[in-house]
Amino acid sequence: MDEALLRSLTPTVIGILVRRGADFAAAEDAVQDALVEAVRVWPDDPPRDPKGWLVTVAWRKFLDAARADTSRQRREALIEAEPVPGPGAAVDDTLQLYFLCAHSSLTPASAVALTLRAVGGLTTRQIAQAYLVPEATMAQRISRAKRTVSGVRFNQPGDIATVLRVLYLVFNEGYSGDVDLAAEAIRLTRQLAAKTHHEEVAGLLALMLLHHARRPARIGPDGRLVPLAEQDRSLWNTRLITEGVEVLQAALTRDRLGEFQAQAAIAALHADAPAAEETDWVQIVEWYDELVRLTDSPVARLNRAVAVGEANGPRAGSAALAALAELDPALPRYAAVAAYLHERAGDPVTAARLYSEAARSASSLLERDHLTRQAARLNAQLRSTGQDCVRRPAPD
């Protein structure tokens, strides 16, 4: 150990720390700590650049001390500001938490995770299980989200539309792990509806209730997806349907129509039909017209084409679909809708090909299995009749 070298380097290292922003006293303390560390380490592991080593270690010591001092001052300030014992202030920050967790600076995945953690009260493990990702991955996602919104103050206005989209994302995740995300989304939306009395929040709640009411009939005993037209409607939850319709009607009376109210109205018309063939497709088309006017969404236009096909015949539905293809030919589920309309129009060859194409791009295993079975069904029918290449004329 070259003590002379240490002594000669001390003022230089202190000067470097001061130029970096440390006050003299703090810099001197940090350098003294670095010297102690040098005495301990250098005999066995001498550095190639003694001055650089001392600067690095001294700066780390200074930062550690600064952080500790800042934390101490913060703790002291919190103690001084601690309210006197007694009942807490009647302030509910839940609504602000909704806005914070759905902040525009967050990605949808981060916003959903942070909402479930901060507003829903779920553990990181539960959220990770629900999204089928490792707990460590979800913990990092939530930590990044919290850092992103750490500077957002509670007095900044929030965007209710963004909150609703985050809640709808939660609802559409359905069920996995030990948390039923659809039920959790309904609970959170109920809470939001009670705090805002906003007609679109009510519309989303009604939509969730009406969709959730059909859940028991959506999957068959064999685990396969059951299309709406084939569902056993006796399995639908009439209590949730009644509540959803009542919530929707109350929202519609405010005469401030929004997209979630329009979607809920369509779901209510499906729920109101005792059988699939009794569905009021004409009125459903009218509601889709409203939804397209409100959103100009390609998905809404796609679903409208199906409704037009049911109300006015498959040729009319195909015409509506063809117009959509010019706007977005790569739209998800486009091929599935086209397959359905071609089958109804008496063109099983094209329908089978489109069902197979739709299955390859399906977003879920259940949907992929359903579309694959539809293609197999039509191909089997064609083989049995020897009409693989024969197309019947489309009905008027």
Image (cartoon, helix red, strand yellow):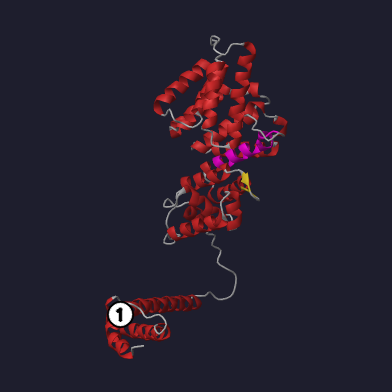
Percent x, y for residue 2? 33, 88
| Quadrant that contains the N terminus | bottom left
Q: Can the viewer see residue 157?
A: yes
**Could you tell me which residue is drawn at 58 percent across and 32 percent down?**
368
> Viewed as shown, does residue 32 lie left or right of 261?
left
Magenta part of the chain: 203-220
Kindly give the residue lying farthest to the front in the view shown.
44
**Which secondary structure lies at badge 1?**
helix
Magenta stretch, main secondary structure class: helix
Q: How many marks?
A: 1
Magenta region includes residue 214 = yes
Say which residue label 1 marks.
51
Percent x, y for residue 317? 50, 20
Residue 24 occupies quadrant: bottom left
* Along the viewing direction, whichever of 149 and 385 lies nearer the viewer: 385
**Could you tell me which residue is drawn at 54 percent across and 33 percent down?**
362
> Viewed as shown, does residue 121 lie left or right of 233?
left
* Along the viewing direction, whichever of 294 and 214 lies nearer the viewer: 214
Percent x, y for residue 108? 47, 48
Magenta region includes residue 12 = no
Residue 366 occupies quadrant: top right
What type is the residue that disc 1 sits on? Lys
